[in-house]
C-alpha cells in the first residue's frame, strides 16, 4: 500500500483518504469501521463553543439573540437543547477515539470568542487529539464589518490557536473570500499547517405554509469537487502548507483529479453516508487501478501534475478558460 503513502499535517498516511467530519465520525463503532475500511485519518464532528459554555453572559449574547425577533423568524434558531453538550462529554469523545484508533484523530473546533478558540483548542489537545481542524464556518451578515476585518479576525484566530497548542492546526474555510490566494499565505504565516477546502455553506429553506425554516442537509455530488480542484491547482506550488480537498469526492476519478491538482489529503463525508464506510475501499482500489492503467507507480508521480504553476499566469489562464467556456457553449 506504500504506493499511496501521503504526508498530511506531519503524519505519514497510508493513503490520502480521510473521513471528514460527519455523523460516521461521531461514534466509536463507525469510527472503527472507517479505520478498518481504509480511512487514513478521521476528523471528528465539530464541537461548538456554544455547546461547551454554560455561563449566563455567554448564553444571553449568543443563544438568546432571538428573543425579540419576529415570530416567523423564531424557527431560525435551533432549540437551545441542541446546545447541551457537556464539555466533559466532548473531551471524552476525543479521548475514546484516540485510544481506540491507530490512525490520526483530528478534532474539529468551531469557536465563537477568542478565549473559547484558544481554551477549547488546548483542552482538545490534552484530551488526545493528534491535530486540530478549525472550522471557520461563518456567514458574514453584519453590514458594519468589512471583508478585511473578517479576514483579520480569522487570521488572528489561526494565530492564537496555533500558538496555544503543540499539535498541527488545519483550517477549514469557505470559498467566498475575495483574494483567496493571498489569504492562504496569511493563514500559513499565522501558523496553519494545512488548508481544508472547502466548507459547504448550508442554505436553510422556507416552509411557506407554516412559515418556518426547513433544514435539509443535502449530500454533495461529484461536480462540487471542481471548486477544491480549481483552488488546490492554483495554490499548489504557491504555498508550502498542506492542501486537503473536501466536497464532492464520490468516485475514484474524483480522487485521481484532486491528487493531480496537488491535494495532500482527499476527504469525504457524503459518499460514506451514502455507501457506507466500505466505500473507502472502493475509492482506494479505484485509485490504484487507475494508476496501474496509466503506469503510475507512486502517487507522488501523480500529485500536482495538473497544478497551475505550469501555466504562466494562473489568473489569465482562468480568465481565458471562462471566455472559451462561454463562447463555445459547453453547457452540459
Ligand atoms: C451530516 C453532515 C454533518 C457534518 N458535520 C460537520 C461538522 O461537524 N464539522 C465540519 O467541519 N463539517 C461537517 N460536515 C461537512 C463535511 O465534513 C464535509 O466537509 C462536507 O460535507 C463536504 O464533503 P462531502 O462532499 O464529502 O460531503 C458535515 C456534513 C454532513 C453531510
Image (cartoon, grey):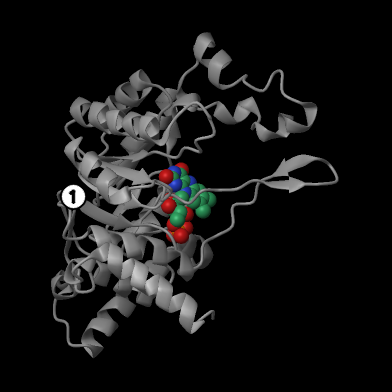
**Residue 27 in view here:** no
Q: Nearer the viewer, residue 161 or 26?
A: 161
- Measured as percent of width and height from the top left, residue 3 is found at 16, 73
Residue lying farthest to the right in this orientation: 209
Q: Position of residue 206 (x, y in %)?
A: 74, 46
Residue identified by numbered label 1? 241
Question: Which residue is at a point 32% across and 49% down the rendered structure image?
Answer: 180
Q: Which quadrant holds residue 296? A: bottom left
- The vertical placement of 134 against 6, above or below, is above
Label 1 CB-ligand 1 distance < 8 A: no
From this view, report whether residue 258 is shown above or below residue 27: below
Does residue 248 appear to the left or right of 75 in the view shown?
A: left
Q: How many marks?
A: 1
* Residue 226 image point, x, y percent: 40, 67
Question: How crowded is the residue under tag 1: few (<14 C-alpha within 10 Å), some, or many (20+)?
Answer: many
Q: Residue furthest bottom?
A: 293
Q: Is residue 221 visible?
A: yes
Q: Residue at x 31, y 21 (%)?
A: 119
- Quadrant of the frame with the N terminus: bottom left
Which quadrant is home to the C terminus?
A: bottom right
Secondary element at tag 1: loop
Q: Which residue: 20% across, 69% down?
A: 304
254 is higher (above) or lower (below) than 107: below
Residue 321 falls left or right of residue 48 = left
Q: Quadrant location of residue 136?
A: top left
User: Along the line of sight, which residue is nearer the eye, 227 or 125?
Assistant: 227
Residue 20 relative to residue 140: left or right: left
Q: Position of residue 246 (x, y in %)?
A: 38, 57
Residue at image x 51%, y 82%? 329
Q: Nearer the viewer, residue 38 or 167?
A: 167
Amino acid at each position: 500500500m506504500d504506493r499511496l503513502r501521503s504526508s498530511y499535517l506531519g503524519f505519514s498516511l497510508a493513503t490520502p483518504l480521510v473521513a471528514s467530519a460527519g455523523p460516521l465520525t461521531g461514534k466509536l463503532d463507525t469510527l472503527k469501521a472507517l479505520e478498518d475500511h481504509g480511512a487514513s485519518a478521521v476528523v471528528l464532528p465539530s464541537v461548538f463553543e456554544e455547546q461547551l459554555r454554560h455561563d449566563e453572559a455567554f448564553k444571553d449574547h449568543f443563544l438568546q439573540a432571538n428573543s425579540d425577533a419576529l415570530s416567523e423568524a423564531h424557527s431560525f434558531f435551533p432549540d437551545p437543547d441542541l446546545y447541551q453538550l457537556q464539555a466533559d462529554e466532548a473531551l471524552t469523545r476525543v479521548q475514546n477515539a484516540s485510544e481506540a484508533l491507530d490512525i490520526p484523530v483530528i478534532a474539529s473546533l468551531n469557536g465563537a470568542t477568542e478565549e473559547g478558540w484558544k481554551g477549547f483548542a488546548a483542552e482538545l489537545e490534552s484530551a488526545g487529539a493528534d491535530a486540530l481542524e478549525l472550522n471557520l464556518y461563518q456567514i458574514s451578515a453584519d453590514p458594519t464589518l468589512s471583508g478585511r476585518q473578517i479576514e483579520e479576525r480569522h487570521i488572528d484566530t489561526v494565530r492564537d490557536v496555533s500558538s496555544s497548542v503543540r499539535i498541527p492546526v488545519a483550517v477549514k474555510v469557505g470559498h467566498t473570500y475575495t483574494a483567496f490566494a493571498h489569504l492562504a499565505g496569511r493563514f500559513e504565516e499565522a501558523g496553519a499547517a494545512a488548508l481544508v477546502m472547502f466548507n459547504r455553506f448550508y442554505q436553510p429553506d422556507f416552509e411557506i405554509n407554516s412559515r418556518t425554516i426547513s433544514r435539509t442537509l443535502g449530500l454533495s455530488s461529484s461536480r462540487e469537487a471542481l471548486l477544491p480542484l480549481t483552488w488546490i491547482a492554483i495554490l499548489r506550488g504557491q504555498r508550502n502548507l498542506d492542501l486537503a480537498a473536501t466536497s464532492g469526492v464520490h468516485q475514484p476519478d474524483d480522487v485521481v483529479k484532486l491528487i493531480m491538482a496537488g491535494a495532500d489529503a482527499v476527504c469525504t463525508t457524503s459518499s460514506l453516508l451514502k455507501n457506507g464506510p466500505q466505500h473507502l475501499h472502493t475509492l482506494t482500489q479505484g485509485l490504484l487501478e487507475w494508476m496501474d492503467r496509466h503506469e503510475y507507480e507512486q502517487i507522488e508521480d501523480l500529485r500536482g501534475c495538473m497544478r497551475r504553476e505550469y501555466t504562466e499566469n494562473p489568473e489569465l489562464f482562468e480568465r481565458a478558460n471562462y471566455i472559451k467556456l462561454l463562447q463555445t457553449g459547453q453547457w452540459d
